[in-house]
Image (cartoon, coloured by chain):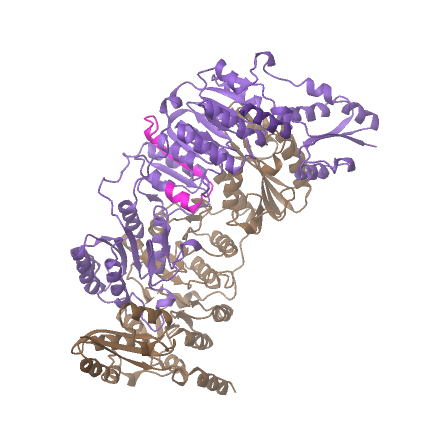
Chain colours: A purple, B brown
Amino acid sequence: MPSIKSELRAGAYYDSAVLMQLQRGLLGLPGVLDSGVVMGTPANQELLAQCGLLVAELRPAGPNDLLIVVKAESDALALAALSQVDALLSRRSSAVSPAFQPRSLETAVQQLPEAQWVLISVPGRFAAGVAREALTLNRHVFLYSDNVSLLDEIELKKAAQEKGLLVMGPDCGTAIINGIGLGFANRVRRGAVGLVGASGTGLQAITSRIHALGAGISQAIGTGGRDLQAEVGAITARQALAALARDPETRVIVLLSKPPAPSVATQLLAAAQALGKPVIVNFIGYPPPARKLGSLHFATSLSEAAELAVEQLSAEGTPSWPAEPPVTGYLRGLFSGGTLAYEAMLGLQAVLSPIYSNAPIRESQKLPDPLKSQAHTIVDLGDDVFMVGRLHPMIDNDLRLRRLRQEAADREVGLILLDVVLGEGAHPDPASELAPAIAEVKTTRPLEVVVLVIGTDADPQNLERQTQRLQEAGAIVFRTATEATEYVARRMSSPPVEPGVPVDLETLHKPLAAVNVGLESFYTSLLGQGAGAVHVDWRPPAGGNEKLAGILARMKKK
Amino acid sequence: MPSIKSELRAGAYYDSAVLMQLQRGLLGLPGVLDSGVVMGTPANQELLAQCGLLVAELRPAGPNDLLIVVKAESDALALAALSQVDALLSRRSSAVSPAFQPRSLETAVQQLPEAQWVLISVPGRFAAGVAREALTLNRHVFLYSDNVSLLDEIELKKAAQEKGLLVMGPDCGTAIINGIGLGFANRVRRGAVGLVGASGTGLQAITSRIHALGAGISQAIGTGGRDLQAEVGAITARQALAALARDPETRVIVLLSKPPAPSVATQLLAAAQALGKPVIVNFIGYPPPARKLGSLHFATSLSEAAELAVEQLSAEGTPSWPAEPPVTGYLRGLFSGGTLAYEAMLGLQAVLSPIYSNAPIRESQKLPDPLKSQAHTIVDLGDDVFMVGRLHPMIDNDLRLRRLRQEAADREVGLILLDVVLGEGAHPDPASELAPAIAEVKTTRPLEVVVLVIGTDADPQNLERQTQRLQEAGAIVFRTATEATEYVARRMSSPPVEPGVPVDLETLHKPLAAVNVGLESFYTSLLGQGAGAVHVDWRPPAGGNEKLAGILARMKKK
């Protein structure tokens, strides 16, 4: 009958790679049927239980305890296996002799002064400390470790930004810097597509696909999954975008993330729009405002992002928006068509913030009083609240004319957007009422009026004449919501300022050299790719005893 | 000094068109500077106030009271204008002589028995009653009226469905049936694109654009804005899709809505997928699962929907999915890449329901325990909860191998989806561990295993050999998440049953004739388009007195 024996080692630090090697070592011993070597978190205990390996004496274990379980053909064989644990731990295979390894980051940097990058994959609770040290030594950080606090992330990124350094991560799985993969990365051709990604496997999927399509990568900069949350404000993504914009080797940029915080998305898209290079945006699960908005191209999948990037490489130069003086002041959209209002919201929320509507996309955009605009506002005048005992605004222009004058009288307003829907059932000649009002408000002060006309050449109102009258009144007329939205976005979005000290492009173009702290496999991967590298024989401060480590840190400061 | 005089008429019914005419009539009288004629809702009172027309004596008015305000050059002129109100109301211009107008729907249908459609635009509180009567007379309903309750909508649509009738609306602005526009509609060429839309101006924008692109419309069926809410369950949209699928004139279908309820979206997309015709989907503001999923094409804007529809008209026949026996049972996705898991969720949630994940798109999809799958499940095994003291699943396959066997042992599981991410930093030969496990679980029972391999031909693991080993073990291998997702969607989604009695296609192809109840302009529009039409000289029951109307209705039933 199989026998299960276990051992609990309280509170000591073990590298994950060591634990995997121990588990495999145990499995290779005589009579061993299964083995489990895990830290004692609730999830890990449940996993052991699912494999029939959780014995009663391990239940009190905590997340910092190491659990070792062996299932063998007999009690004797199980005990024999357990007795080998220390021997297996010491036999730990290593590619590098510890004799040549520095024990601290500082020493490592002295050994390899050209190393501009520090790769950190130590357990989360120690990672911020190592990253802080790397920044003090003026090195860029690739922070693979997860379980780093949000506050640490913000502090690290702000400190880095002030020095023109990048902190990729925490929880950054992938980057390709000057042809060398950091962390998990596919081997891909060098080329002219630069990537910024809050997603490791996303970067891997896109770079692999670009390679398969025959193109290549200039730089792929990871940001960590939380960079686009409101609290972090996309510090790394904005630094990376700005750097790729200045990078002469990068002709097309891909920006990739799981859905960002809405306010961050707006900022980031406005920044991306101002880069002067085509940017493929894949905010996975974020409803794209359009297929294309100026120089932004929205992809709906990772493979499509790759395809669009490769397409843009051979596209005629980016139609970068002409340098007109932008409209200052707010947008006010006065719509008769609910869906047209909604589509305009969807497009303009990508670049204008804050924006409100009685047909909001998100609850936070809800206009408190549909009769009063605030900041950028888009009103659907066909909304139920306006419709009691009143004809639809496609038939009766009265409400819209009054609101148009009201908005024009607001000195904070810079652009008014209207729709005019022609066809059966609608007003027989809307331009006869709207055009004089537009001409009138435009005489008072500089104000752009943009009109989206929906109609056909067969419509009873005469599309051509309606358009002409509106244009004669000074309106700029479009025939699709996409074109109208794109025009308004172009006129109203102002290029954001590059945050902090610009990242030095030279460090991205020098042959990559790095210090590795943590997973040894990342070090051997660097060497295999021909990069300069040194591996720190890192141990947690005070052997992982956090109380003692705290005391040591305080002593060091004094 | 200008003078403002007002009048309040309590509780009487007035047609909105009549109110607009009265307001214009007053404005045309000598010395009148402005006028307001509105029902006394809070919003309307505030609008009067904004125009400086709200006088104190009107403040107590309620939503069923008519407010008439005149601003004139003097008291005398204001009072003179007000004295004309009754004369103006009786001078109401009308295109039809009331002498020839039936007073009831029943009489109207006797007058024009070929009328298969009833257009209803009476005030919301009376609209459901008229619609009920139309269904009793076996007529399709175009319900323009808004402010109809959700319960009434559900009741009407269920009743219609049992008779093979359509209820387009409430709040349905637009339809084009057999070339005739109902409500607000642009004049467009006949053609092979059929539309189903929960959005009036959306249908107008798309049909106008299709016309501008040189193509045309077979039918455009409105559903009303709430049809795709969970409570209504898209009854009209599903009837309409099924009808267009059977319609030989329709070669491409466009399905349009503001974001539908997620459960309804899944049902509707599964239904659309099974139609055997290309379907352009534009769920405005809904993140598209991909650019293309089987025969579904996802558009990000109204104009793009039109462009895709026209493109599909000339595309090589739809690659309709081959008729294989579908996989029965649940999907279990075991991912090492978080973003790959998320992208698979995004695609598969469109056609599989319910689906759970520890990387959910919506909170309701949250897997309560990441260690236990339920229904369709996609697990990101790189999630923090799995990662304490454990190497990433791209390096260490142990966790995945155990979970793979666990899922395979679950008899309810029909398909297992894995990712394998190659490249620097990853396991040197993942197929050597995964392929034998796949082969093993496939021997036990019929089970499909699909593997998404991310990698390049330059990766150290040898992409070709990895793929081959996985295929030899019986896995179906893809190189992009989009292809893998599309395959899984195809194998697992089952065609839904057409609800209720099928709509008779003949009524869509007969020359359109309709009874109009409400806005006279819709009647004149029908006549202008050459349709057969009769206008009911409708008055609210008991002159709009709802208490009395209730008594009358009860008497009628007896």
**Looking at the picture, how far across and down is residue B328, in whole percent?**
61, 48
Q: Is residue A99 above or below residue A336?
A: above
Front residue of B355/A357: it is A357
Front residue of B92/A379: it is A379
Q: Quadrant of residue A206?
A: top left
Q: Quadrant of residue A149?
A: top right
Please give the count of numbered marks on the rendered protein.
0
> Is residue A266 part of the magenta span, yes or no?
yes
> Is residue A220 part of the magenta span, yes or no?
no
**Looking at the picture, how far across and down is residue A9, in whole percent?**
72, 28
Q: Is residue B496 above or below residue B383?
A: below
**Looking at the picture, how far across and down is residue B555, in whole percent?**
49, 87
Q: Which residues are magenta?
A: A244-267
Relative to A44, A395 lies left or right: left
Q: Is residue B373 above or below residue B399?
A: below
Outermost residue, top direction?
A99
Front residue of A425/A339: it is A339
Residue B213 appears anywhere in the view: no
Classify the position of the N terminus of chain B by image quarter: bottom left
Relative to A67, B323 lies left or right: left
Residue B446 appears anywhere in the view: yes
Relative to A42, A176 lies left or right: left
**Looking at the picture, how far across and down is residue A397, in whole percent?**
26, 66
Q: Is residue B333 above or below residue A105?
A: below
Outermost residue, front direction?
A558
